[in-house]
Image: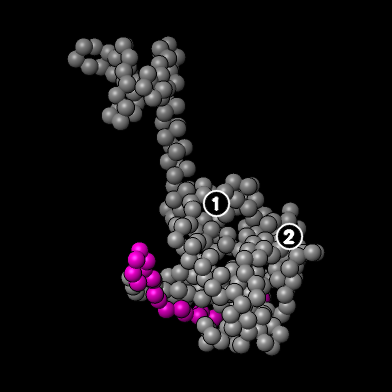
Amino acid sequence: MNYRLSPSDLTFLYDGCKHCFVLKVKHGIPQPSIPIPGVFSIIASLQKNHYAGQRTENFCAGLPPGTVTLGEKRVRSSQISFEGLASTCHISGRFDIIASLDDGTYAVIDFKTGNPNEGKAAMYGRQLHAYTLALENPAPGELKLTPVSRLGLLYFTPDACEYVGGSCQILRGAMTWVEVGRDDAQFRSFLREVVSVLDGPLPPPEVQNCDWCRYRSRLVEASTSLESIAEPAAGEIAAPTCPICSGPMKLRTGKHGEFWGCVRYPDCRGTRPG
């Protein structure tokens, strides 16, 4: 099998829950989509437009001289194989910006909004390595840029708000360059681990750390409970459905005798005569 690996999935999803990661990549069952707050997408888009064509030395002292030449381009790597593994993988994703440096090499840069964090920088480094691998080893007909000499994150950390008149205000904040050291051997070893996990049995749900695994677990428990209530034992009368929510009902006893009440009471107060 040739697995398609998204650079973003190699960060939060892989570290967050390997059960959900395998469901998405191998079985095509993604977690329900939770849109990124629109303001972050707007900030990223404005940054990409603003820095397009700009000289690196004008906005980032940590980068060698060069010019931002590409933004928001899709990349796809050639097939990646591993000794001893039958399955392969390839990288497919979209980078933020690329700077063409004056020395003939390239810098891969990702925009982030928030406070720089060493732990997150190491994790985001996988994204940058994935883009680099795809750029230097592209599939036929795909974008090729080589060599890539610099990887890093450009953090925008808002720390001031200024009203400038009319109905306009400006957010101000520091721009911090966080260099990511390139380590191709370590990244390839990581990809081998990922493919091994995908080839193996489905990892158990991580109900303690993953909201979606916890939700699915509770859903199964609730479904099993409702089925046991709704299915009558031998000789029992089948429970009717609730006239309000159409859910299962349970035989209850009140001051006027037996009656059918919705199992969702008190959230639902549907009843039927006993």
Magenta highlight range: 164-184
What residue does disc 2 label? Answer: 88
Give the mark nearest the N terminus, 1 or 2: 1
Q: Quadrant of residue 269?
A: top left
Is residue 100 shown above or below 230? Answer: below
The x and y percentages for residue 226 are 42, 28
Q: Which mark is residue 20?
A: 1
Instruction: Name the outermost residue toward the left.
Output: 255
Q: Which mark is residue 36?
A: none
Mark 1 is on which residue type? Cys
The reply to whether the magenta stretch includes residue 178 is yes
* Residue drawn 45% across the image and 27% down it: 227
Give the residue at x 54% y 73%: 50
Query: Mark 2 packing: few (<14 Cα in 10 Å), some, or many (20+)?
Result: some
Whole-angstrom CA distance, mark 1 to mark 2, is: 20 Å
261 is higher (above) or lower (below) than 45: above
